[in-house]
Image: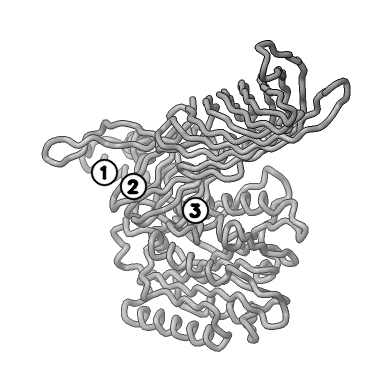
Amino acid sequence: MDAPCFVYFFRAFFPRISAWRALFFGVCALFCSAPSLASLPQHSFCAVASGNCNEDSEVLRVALVIGHNQAGERALPLRFAELDARKVHDLLVQLAGYKAGDIWLLTGQSAPAVERAMLSIQQRIAEQRKRWGPKKRIILFVYYSGHAQKGRLLLGESTLTFTQIKRFVRGTLASLRLVVFDACESGEILQGKGLKRRKEGFRFPFVRLAPSATGEVMITATGHKESAHEDPSLRGGIFTHYLLSGLRGAADQNNDGHVTLEEAYNYSYNRALARTIFSQRGPQRARFSKRLSGYGSLILTTLSQQRAWLWLHPQLAGEFFVWTSQRDLLLAEVVKNKGREVQVALPPGRYILQWRRKHGIYHQSIALEKGQRFRLRHLGQRLAYWIPKDLRGGTKASNGDWRSFEGQLLGPSLGVSYTGGWSGVDQGVWHHGPSLHLRLPLDGVGTGRMSLLLQFGSQHGSTTLPNTLGFHLHTLQLDIGLQWTLLARPHWWLGAGVLLRGSLLAQALWPREQASEQTLWSGSFGPAGIFSVQYGFAVLWFLQLDLLAGARFLNLGGEWTVRWDLNASLGVGVRF
């Protein structure tokens, strides 16, 4: 309601009041109501996102998703472009409100097949326009992953020009057109209109749309002469991977359950640039171009639309990866600092959660049920999940318990074991005895995969020498060294390292027919390698097997000599 409306309102109820006084009271009333109006939901572009708007049934969302690994003889084949296209298709259905029947997914198809799909989309939009008129809101999303060169998409042996793509996009009668290209030199489609980051203080061009806004947004993974990167460890293109991770919730900076265009672009730009900054092919910088009119935040995905969520407590920190149960597809990656909660939207099912932190890498299989919010936090140095308590009648209480996942082999450990081995001291002799082990992770060293290892033990053994003399060996052993994590799984841990060993030796010889014996005291030192396997059978407890091989330098009869040493031990330990 504007100021003149307030004048008429006040004079209708108070006919004797002057126009100027009515205007004064009207402005005061408008000013006092501002806080309440500010608290109302912002007009967001729900046409692209969820079905939370009343007008959602009036929105038609159409998508063209293209992926092609091959480029003929013009470039080496890609590995994950077609897989990226399928991942984009799945996200549009799960989080962006698209129907599978309105998505044209083309993987490994030629240019004529793409042209036929574009014609079908134009006909589909034209039919809706003819039926519902200009008020019908129609959203067109176009995605391409593959090779591009000199202004052309390389689709196997065929090509499609950027000009054809733009002519198709702008020739449709869609209200909003959103284009994303993940290809080398894809910034050329912007024709110099993209915005480049030239300093850290660069601000994303803030996009505001009304529910009836029209226009065009184009995002490219690279600039005009830049290369787009694939990463086998991510099983996809780097830009697409971070864009999809952001749309699943990693980019939701204000935790409002919506991922806007600004949030998604900033997240994917920064993460892709950070991962490629030292690449031999050069860093990868996304580009952005827009031609829009209207107001209101442009929402790309709405996390509440998904049926299950992974929720990360503000105190958690580290890198989180969510894989499919077969570990063949990385769905989301979140780099999280303390102080911010994050939720990742996923369809119900089984997943592998990977948590990389300074103490190492932890893997855990999790299952998400329909409507479940799977909550994670620290419990000591371990990852814990929330178990809500059930009340009578089948309802769940707001309180519950945090429970650590079993087998988290993280943090310092103390163990005892029994060791047996064979040493070539003077004569080969079997020896055995107890040992004590202390392992201390070195934070911030070796990306958190390195530990300091201390071992102390006592062993003894005996044998008969060829000249009918008896031989006894007693050792006090102190080892110190470093050990690296080779593999970390929910219940299994494998490590290897190097040790510096020091020993106090007591060697005793005695004739069989005499009671007295002669004892020789000496010392030894030398390097050794160690291989360790741990199996966690409870939250804190584990079984451990160690294999050790090395050499001893010792003084025998006034001469220094080298003897080999082999040991194996089996024991039990606890993490604390």
Look at label 2 and name its amino acid. Met
Q: Is residue 224 left or right of residue 33?
A: right
- Return the residue at label 1: 9
- Return the residue at label 3: 332
Instruction: Report the mark closest to the observer, 1 or 2.
Output: 2
Residue at 71% x, 26% y: name it: 468
**Percent position (x, y) of residue 448?**
62, 36
Can the viewer see residue 20? no
Check disc 1 and report its element: helix, strand or loop. helix
Check disc 2 and report its element: helix, strand or loop. loop
Q: Rate crowding at label 3 as few (under 14), some (14 to 19) or many (20 or more) other CA atoms within 10 Å.
A: many
Instruction: Measure how far apart labels 1 and 3 are at the Cα level.
Output: 55 Å
Quarter residue 545 falls in? top right
**Mark 1 vs 2: CB contact within 8 A:** yes
Instruction: Measure how far apart labels 3 and 2 are at the Cα level.
Output: 45 Å
Is residue 175 placed above or below 378 in the rendered structure? below
Residue at 52% x, 35% y: name it: 544
The answer to which of marks 3 and 2 sits earlier in the sequence is 2
**Percent position (x, y) of residue 479?**
68, 25
- Return the residue at label 2: 1
Is residue 173 placed above or below 96 in the rendered structure? below
